[in-house]
Image (cartoon, rainbow, N blue to C red):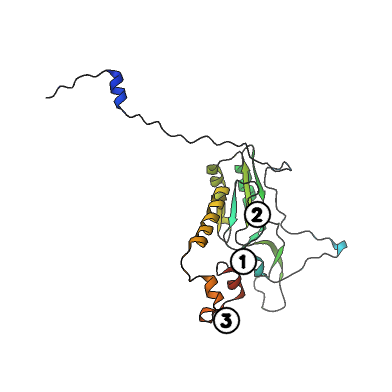
């Protein structure tokens, strides 16, 4: 057997490679902007709009107006407080029951110096319904409830303050299944990354067969059977 000679402690320690663990820098909140009205909790959404008879305003019935949820949002697509929120990935409608559920669940989770704000309008579009067993005909039924239409890429709500991304995901992710249309968690970093990826794809794309070329040269007489919405939104939104 070979005899292992004892080495001085300083030589033994010098030959070992000690790797310091890498800890993430603690999150700071110097640039957080709180709501100017001082309201940190989600306010309740009215279940129906208010009408002033003196101004000639009365309840009215209308069609479903699916056009209100069609296409892409062009205005409310940025996070005001540059932190976290929920974004609609497709068009849909939010009812007063959905607003109440989200408000109750989210307000219970918010801690001190954390806030949440709505980014959509209160319900205003009426939905009618006939009583069970009623025969067809006889006009539209009575107003059952009101909904809020949203388009794709619309910011539904924001969460901010002294909150980390881990906490925001825990607050918002399970609320996405409440909606009847696809909704995702979003942050300022994720939003900028998605837009950069879209810009890179458009810039470095080498495939000449795309929507712009197809519509420009009317390949296979596509403008005859494509709808105006396919031409405007390049087939991305319905």
The answer to which of marks 2 and 3 sits earlier in the sequence is 2
Give the numbered dot on residue 50. Answer: none
Mark closer to the chain start, 1 or 3: 1
Task: Find residue 109 and report its image quarter.
Answer: top right
Name above or below for residue 37 compared with residue 205.
above
Residue 223 percent location from the top left of the image: 57, 79
Please name the residue shown 72% across and 76% down the image: 139
Callout 2: SS: helix
Q: CA distance from mark 1 to mark 3?
A: 20 Å
Q: Quadrant of the C terminus?
A: bottom right
- Assign a secondary structure to mark 1: loop
Query: Label 3, on which residue?
Result: 224
Q: Residues within 10 Å of mark 1 (few under 14, many from 20)?
A: many
Q: Nearer the viewer, residue 157 or 177?
A: 157
Q: Earlier in the sequence, mark 1 or mark 2?
A: 1
Quadrant the N terminus occupies: top left
């Amino acid at each position: 057997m070979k005899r292992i000679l004892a080495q001085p402690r300083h030589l033994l320690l010098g030959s070992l490679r000690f790797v310091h663990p890498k800890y993430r820098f603690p999150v700071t909140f110097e640039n957080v902007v709180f709501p100017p009205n001082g309201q940190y909790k989600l306010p309740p959404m009215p279940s129906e709009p208010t009408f002033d008879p003196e101004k000639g305003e009365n309840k009215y019935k209308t069609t479903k107006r699916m056009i209100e949820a069609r296409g892409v949002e062009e205005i409310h697509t940025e996070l005001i407080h540059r932190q976290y929120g929920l974004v609609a990935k497709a068009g849909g409608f939010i009812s007063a029951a959905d607003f109440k559920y989200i408000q109750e669940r989210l307000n219970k989770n918010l801690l001190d110096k954390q806030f949440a704000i709505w980014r959509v309008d209160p319900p205003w579009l009426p939905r009618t319904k006939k009583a069970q067993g009623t025969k067809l005909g006889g006009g539209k039924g009575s107003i059952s409830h009101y909904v809020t239409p949203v388009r794709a890429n619309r910011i539904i709500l924001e969460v901010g303050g002294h909150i980390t991304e881990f906490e925001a995901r825990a607050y918002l992710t399970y609320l996405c299944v409440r909606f009847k249309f696809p909704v995702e968690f979003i942050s300022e970093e994720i939003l900028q990354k998605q837009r950069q990826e879209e810009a890179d794809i458009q810039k470095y794309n080498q495939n000449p067969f795309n929507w712009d070329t197809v519509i420009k040269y009317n390949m296979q007489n596509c403008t005859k059977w494509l709808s105006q919405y396919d031409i405007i939104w390049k087939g991305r939104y319905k």
